[in-house]
Amino acid sequence: MSSFDYINDLLHHNDTVLLTLCDKQHIILLDTLMVLDFIDFIKGTFSMLELNEAIAL
């Protein structure tokens, strides 16, 4: 989701993205700005998990 081509296509052709999670039990509909925020949120989440793991050692 974070490649330049994907973001470019999202900005110029699509204005929403439909995400399905947990074997399609949960559905999330995001607009362009929400997708960009979601990407930052996921990156931040994994960074914090890695930091927690490093501290726990």
Image (cartoon, grey):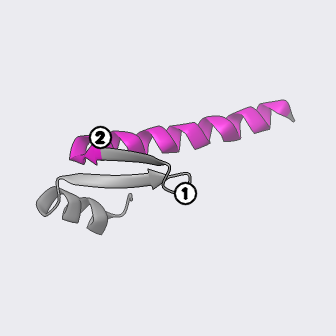
Who is closer to the viewer here, 15 or 20?
20
- Image coordinates of residue 23 in percent, x first then y, are 54, 57
Q: Residues within 10 Å of mark 1 (few under 14, many from 20)?
A: few
Q: In which quarter of the image is the N terminus?
A: bottom left
The residue positioned 44% from the left and 54% from the top of the image is: 20
What label sits on residue 23 in the rendered view?
A: 1
Q: In which quarter of the image is residue 4?
A: bottom left
Task: Say the numbered circle drawn on residue 13.
Answer: none
The residue at the point 29 percent across, 45 percent down is 30
The x, y position of residue 33, in whole percent, is 24, 42
Image height of 23 relative to 46, above or below? below
User: What's the magenta bit mostly, secondary-structure-wise?
Assistant: helix
Q: Which residue is drawn at 60% across and 40% down?
A: 47
Secondary element type, mark 1? loop
Q: Residue at x 48, y 55 (%)?
A: 24
Residue picked out by circle 2: 34
Q: Position of residue 15 (x, y in %)?
A: 17, 53
How far is disc 1 from disc 2 in space, using C-alphas?
22 Å
Decide whether residue 53 is among the magenta residues. Answer: yes
State which quarter of the image contains the C terminus.
top right
Secondary structure beneath dot 2 equals helix
Q: Earlier in the sequence, mark 1 or mark 2?
A: 1
Give the quarter of the image for residue 37.
top left
Residue furthest to the left:
12
Q: Is residue 39 above or below residue 41?
A: below
Stretch of the chain drawn in magenta: 30-56
